[in-house]
Amino acid sequence: MDLSNANGWLKNKKNIYSAAGIVGLIFLSGIWWYTQSRAEDEVRNFFDEYEQLDSVSYKKVSYNPLSGTLTLSNIEIEPNKSDFLLAIDSLEIHDVEFDDNIPEHISFSIEGIQLDVLELANNFNINQSTLRYITTERLSDNTLATLFLLGYYNLPVNLDVDISYDQDDEEFEWNFSANADELGELSFSYNVVNLKRKFFKIFDSEWMGGMSVAMFMNFNPSRISELEKIIKTVKKSKLAYFKAEYNDLGLFERVKHFTEIEHNYVKGDTHPFELTEDKKRYQIKQLKRNGASIETAESIINAQANFLVDIDSISIETNIDEPFSLRKLEGKENGRIMKLLRIEGNN
Amino acid sequence: MENYLIKRNNLMFLNIKVILFVFSVFLSNQAFSVELYQIAHSKKLGVEALIEQKNDGWCNKQIKIHFKTQKESFFQDDSAQNLVGKLIGIILSECPTVKEAEIGGYVTSPSNTIYRATAALSDNWTLHQQPIESVKPLVADKKPDLFNNFSNAAEPMAAEVEKMQRPQLNIVNSFAVDGWRPPLTNDLFVLDLNAKEKRIYTLDKSCSFRFTRTYRIKEEDTNTAYLSIEGVSCLDGYIHGDGSVKVLRVDGRMLREYKGFFSHGYFTGAKHLKEARVWDMPFIKRDSKKITLLLDVDEAQKIYYVGYLGGISGEAWSICAETKITALTENNQLFMHAGKIKGIVDHITQLNEKYCPRVTSFAFDARRGISETKNNKLFSISYIQKNRSGKWSYRPRYTKNFALKRIQEEKMLAEKKKREKKRLWQRAQNDYDRLKTADFGQKLSYLYEIRKLDNPINLTAISVLTDNPSKGTILVAIDDIDGDSAIVDWPYEFVVNDISEFVTEEGWYILKGEMEVVDIKELDDFGVPKSEFIVETAVQCIQERCNEINDIEAIVKKKHSLPDWEANNITSQE
């Protein structure tokens, strides 16, 4: 082999690779550009289809073809004829997979839902409900007032949702998580089997619209019958697993502080949050009276007591070997449901 | 100077009072000393004019006039000359023989003479002032003693009279009626300020008479009168007993003569009147119209019976002139029973028979105290009459039973008080029951009348929301005082301002004022924005966290001002 030829070959090969690389980059950027452009169009079309283009605005749409994630940044939602503006830092749609209206997989995250509690309080009649709730001594059922009292004037909330449905196994799984800085994180996991696909009619916008009319405006027996069928479908399904968990990032510390002041607590007193043995026994007894097993009642009340002393996390979850028919839970007292699902409390 | 002259038949001059004595009938053959008599005085000038009288009277060729003045300036101008000119005119009309006058002037006493002058008719009564060194006291520096001048006056008897025993009823166990007890001595005898009387003494001042009938006798006569007593005794310096008393004028002329009975200085009636002999009963008091005296005591029923000496019959204070007997008692129950009333009436008729047998009707009242007021009247019979057969009786219509009425009123009042107390106790009990389930703030509000106790976090939130200070009342522990500000240590750290008037030491306080957010972005670990509390008023707690309010029974007692109230004790209300 001629070395010079060999060198030239090698040189050409390098050039070819370089050229191929450049072409590849151009191709990739073209694909990227195409996908970005396509994504923008798709998003626009989506909002257009639902006639929400006037209500929703966003600064940027991006799509990552490698991860398949569609991202909308700096979203502002302003419902029609409303002064209320909801700002969201970003929406990431990881996966949306429908098969004939059946959501085989939906996964998305929302970062930074900006809840301006101060502005909300000002917008929602400060001289009426909110102020009234705030002027009462105790933390109220009014969430807005409670958040305000506890100093959450601006609350960025993050959400993670993951839904999947296996048509073959008729298994539906739902994971939800919401968290906010200096407040806390709440998550749910829900798994049911034997859920028939007709349940997902509720995702059909036409069906939903018709149902609303049937329910509230024009009573239509055939539509009501359809709703009953959906409910029957749910009842026929079986719960395989459920878990709810809360991790405190500050909310309960603030509630504790507020309650201490409310009870004029000083060190050395019995803390108003403290569950004494007597109180624990009483609450366990109450749960048992409602049908809970002793194990369930003790684990839940102990988890609650531990959480109130050392505020960190608390969870409840089912501990069943076989999926349990939801129909069998119908009309049962809470304690009985806990017993049937063998719910456990943990920290 | 016209005002100083008093002329006969012309009394138009003001502020001068001229008293001229008619000396022509004056005493003779006496051993006299120098005497001064006021002949004129002027309030305006503050001067008295006195004339000097010797044993042969004042009307001589030469007279002496004294000016007693309140201010020395009287002698420094023409005042003395003018006054002398006018006085001489009057003096000459009474005594034309006067040719010369010697004038002396002093401020307080003749021994302190500050002015001396002479005047003579020949010189038209012009005053010629003399050197003061040559002045000698015109009269002795002592109060004129009239009695020493009259050697033929009645002999002083009082010093020789027998001392009588002090009158008193035989009371074994003295008791009080509305705080009053019978006096043990005459020293306690109380004279009403309106009850005028003149005390006239014997010449040796050892005994005296309470002269209460001054009509038809000139006041100046009583001022200088003296007493001549015969046979009557003396007790505590007052005539007391039976005998004769003469009241004599300074010149020896008799003004009055009393023969009969005397008690505690008063004439109580002629000797032929049995009822006039009341000296064995203590006198209690005298007012303008009557003298109250103790007639009898019923120790068993705790009654003092008192009678009265009236003064309507001539000169004597007569027990039968004031026909009324009074029972002094605190025993209301006596008048609840007809039998006891009858017993009292029987007794007072006996007293009347004893002291005024000729009196056939009298009045009776019962009082709860020596004073005569409407409120202390217990019972009264306005007319008790003795019929021909000698039996005493009275008609119901003349009777008023105040005691019964009072007892009924008192019973009603007691019932009312009892109901009121029950109502108050029940109200306190209601509060107590309510407070048992009340929280700290509610109890604090109850005791200190605070509408409600606020959580400072609530106030801060309101301030944030309204963008204005929010008013409220909070419980805090103040830790670090620095002038007009302090740091709150509990419930959480924040600054309080304007404290100087209310907070002077560290401790627990209830503060009323307003919370203002300083920086909404500067939150503490519990989400509370930086804020300050401006104090309007403050109450300092007694205990930590005002724990005093946890003693519910104590705070209910304090709130209702019922120190003897007890929780859950209904029987104590009865």
Image (tube, rainbow, N blue to C red):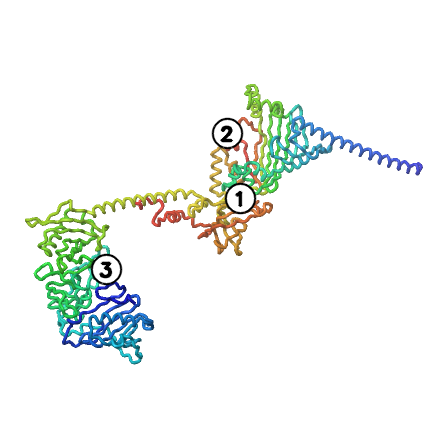
The chain ID associated with circle 1 is A
| Whether label 3 touches label 2, CB < 8 Å | no
Q: Distance between the residues labelled 3 and 2?
A: 100 Å
- Image mark 2: chain: A
Q: Are marks 1 and 3 in contact (CB under 8 Å)?
A: no
Q: Residues within 10 Å of mark 1 (few under 14, many from 20)?
A: some
> Which residue corresponds to mark 1?
A256
Q: In this view, does A48 lie to the left or right of B67?
A: right
Q: Which amino acid does label 3 sit on?
A: Leu
Q: Mark 2 points at which residue?
A: A332
Residue B76's x, y, as percent? 33, 73
Q: Please provide percent x and percent y for residue B241.
A: 12, 65
In the rendered image, which quarter is residue B395 located in?
top left
Separation of residues labelled 1 and 3 (CA atoms): 81 Å
Residue at x 14% of width, y 49% of height: B383
Q: Is residue A48 left or right of residue B335?
A: right
